[in-house]
Image: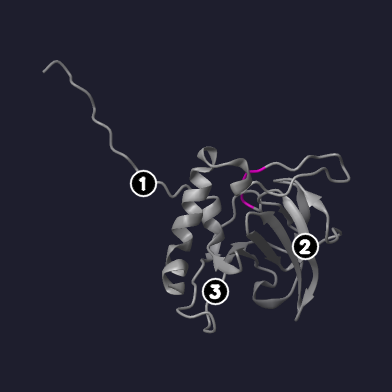
Amino acid sequence: MKTIYLAATPLLVTFLLLNSASLPQTALAPAQGTNAQGVTATKGWSWPLTPQPKVLRAFDPPAQRWLAGHRGADLGAHPGDVVLAPAAGIVTYVGVIVDRPVLVIDHGAGLKSSFEPVSTDLVPGSIISAKERIGSIGVGAHCTKRCMHWGLRLNGEYIDPLLTIRDARPSILLPLGNKGG
């Protein structure tokens, strides 16, 4: 049963994100509140870097939780580049893990983003808005001087963060119409 859940997770996230208007507000509502600058948190997902970065390494989950894999997406970036919140939320972790600065944001509904290496002045409990500056690219780990790793978890399971910003709906071909015949 667990395997079915893991395989269906990207589809579930895509469905929830693309059909959020038809769901109760609590189903996808990020943390709400006002930060120190008086900005109110709202929902919405966007790239955490501008302009839209190149994806250097895509999400590549392992076959089993304990195996090696790439649990996120590496986005092209350089030390000092500004990092933006892809969606509103609350900062739940700021610190160094092994050799890199890490920032974690809880977006509500079981979704948590992690960013590394990202240096920040924010503290756990900070309420942030979508597209708000959350830090800058630091150094450390496999991304040093070339990228930022963006991880996303849904209820503790890693999922592809690019599902939140890329339109995964199928293309629909419409008839050209009847031209006199």
> Hey, what amino acid is under mark 1?
Pro
| Mark sitting earlier along the chain (1/3) | 3
- Neighbour class for label 1 at 10 Å: few (<14), some, many (≥20)? few
Q: Which residues are magenta?
A: 43-47
Q: Is residue 45 visible from the viewing direction of this image?
A: no
Asked whether disc 1 touches disc 2, contact meaning CB atoms under 8 Å apart, the reply is no
- Residue named by callout 1: 170
Quarter of the image holding residue 157?
bottom right
The residue at 49%/71% (across/down) is 60
**Where residue 70 is drawn, which disc sits there?**
3
Magenta-drawn stretch contains 77: no
Q: Determine whether the residue tagged by mark 1 lies in a helix, strand or loop.
A: loop
**Cα distance in 3D space between marks 1 and 3:** 26 Å
User: Outermost residue toward the right?
Assistant: 36
**Cα distance in 3D space between marks 3 and 2:** 22 Å
Q: Position of residue 86 (x, y in %)?
A: 66, 51
The residue at 54%/38% (across/down) is 21
Q: Determine whether the residue tagged by mark 3 lies in a helix, strand or loop.
A: loop
> Hey, what amino acid is under mark 3?
His
Say if 35 sits above or below 140 in the image.
above
Q: Is residue 52 visible from the viewing direction of this image?
A: yes
Say if 21 sits above or below 77 in the image.
above
| Mark sitting earlier along the chain (1/2) | 2
Q: Position of residue 53 (x, y in %)?
A: 59, 55
Say if 69 sits above or below 153 in the image.
below
Quadrant of the drawing holding the N terminus: bottom left
Pick the residue in front: 39 or 74. 39
- Residue named by callout 2: 92
Q: In the image, which is nearer the foreground, mark 3 or mark 2? A: 2
> Hey, what amino acid is under mark 2?
Thr
| Mark sitting earlier along the chain (3/2) | 3
